[in-house]
Amino acid sequence: MAAVTIRDVALAAGVSLSSVSRALNGGKYVSARVAHDVAQAATRLGYKPDFLARSLRTRSSGMVGCLVSDVSNPLNGSIVRAAEAHLRDAGYMLVVASTANDPTRERAAADEFKGRRFDGMLVAPGSGANDSMWRELALGGTPVVVLDRDPIGARDDSRWPAVLVDHHGGAKAATRYLLGLGHRRIALLTADARMRPSRERIAGFQEAYAETGVDPSGAQLCIQSTPMDFAQGDTVALLRGERRPTAIIALGTRILAGVLRAARNLDLSVPRDLSVLSVGDTDLASVHAPAITALRWSLEDVGRAAAELLLQRLRGDFGGGQSRALLEVDLVLRESCAPPLLRSVQL
């Protein structure tokens, strides 16, 4: 049986060849009705685009690269899924690579994407060691959108499109909430402080103490290099100390799991003996008993916003929309936080 062609799709949809081409390639001047009719016809006929032919014709591979530290992390996974769906609707395929925040792996993946002539990239850069590489790619014409990291090369450089999360405001709200419950010894367990999310959380954490006038000597920072095992060990050490924290703020994936396991091993009850607050509203936070109070932001919005910023640049629409998006963080109150026991707050 002969392969279905773009002409067959145009005939079935009752539109011109050029309309089908624009609709399938995410063109700007396509009405919602035409895009719908073309998509329906293509699906019904089983049309599969010839990406090699399109690449030769349009100088476009139809593929976008995505670099994240760990695709198995539920927070990253939700972002990637939303970005993939938005890009797929526009006719692009998303290819994902995990870097483990390793500059060498990051550079190798970017080189691979460039060698395969990917049309653009969504990236969550690691330590900043590869800033010059990202700059060269972008200045060479490859659209690059940053996922919740510092703008490439300079923290205040607005030329680099980025989707950011208000981790500063979220951590500040979480800390103020715990301080309001009466906690004074609060520990923040977060990841690499060189990364924007952790750096912003630390700043918000410390600012909450300063603004409320609470003695900051009870604030404890615990930087996690390897998520779960180190979180459990560090939490056990914290909770066995003379000035053990009465509340812990922890990243909501493997670090949170390590905190909860440590509390269980020490026979500490949440929230009676220890209040726990999750950074990120993951499945673990919502299904744990008791359910964990959490900082929540829309991971889907991060993915969609990043994909849309990239599509704007792929369409050459540099002035038609914003180059930055800052997403709010909400505090979701559940059952894992309570005022500290009197004996726990005595110095």
Image: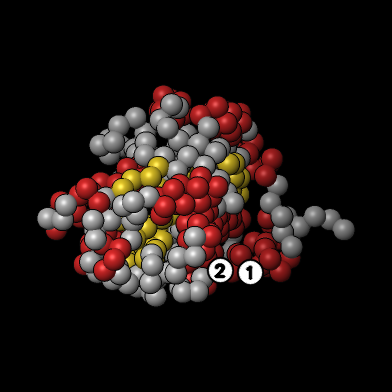
Above or below, 185 against 130 in this view is: below
- 1 and 2 marks in contact (CB < 8 Å): yes
Residue 165 is left or right of residue 104, and the answer is left
- Amino acid type of disc 1? Gln
SS assignment at label 1:
helix
Quarter of the rendering containing residue 281: bottom left
Decide which of 15, 70 is in the foreground and name it.
70
Q: Residue furthest right?
A: 1
Residue 132 screen position, x and y as percent = 41, 24
Residue 252 screen position, x and y as percent = 46, 58
Residue 152 is left or right of residue 97, and the answer is left
Residue depicted at 50% across the width and 57% down the height: 262
SS assignment at label 2:
helix
Decide which of 337, 207 is in the foreground and name it.
337
- Amino acid type of disc 2? His
Would residue 167 be seen by someone viewing this image from the given angle?
no
Above or below, 121 against 168 in this view is: above
Would residue 2 be seen by someone viewing this image from the given angle?
yes
Q: Quadrant of the N terminus?
A: bottom right
Tell me, for residue 32, which label it has, or none: none
User: Mark 1 = which residue?
Assistant: 40
Identify the coloring: secondary structure
Residue 139 is left or right of residue 178, and the answer is right
Label 2: how many residues lie within 10 Å, few (<14), some (14-19) or many (20+)? some
Above or below, 200 against 271 in this view is: above
Quarter of the rendering containing residue 213: bottom left
Residue depicted at 50% across the width and 36% down the height: 101
Tell me, for residue 36, which label it has, or none: 2
Residue 303 screen position, x and y as percent = 46, 55
Q: Quadrant of the C terminus?
A: bottom left
Residue depicted at 26% across the width and 68% down the height: 342
Residue 99 screen position, x and y as percent = 55, 37
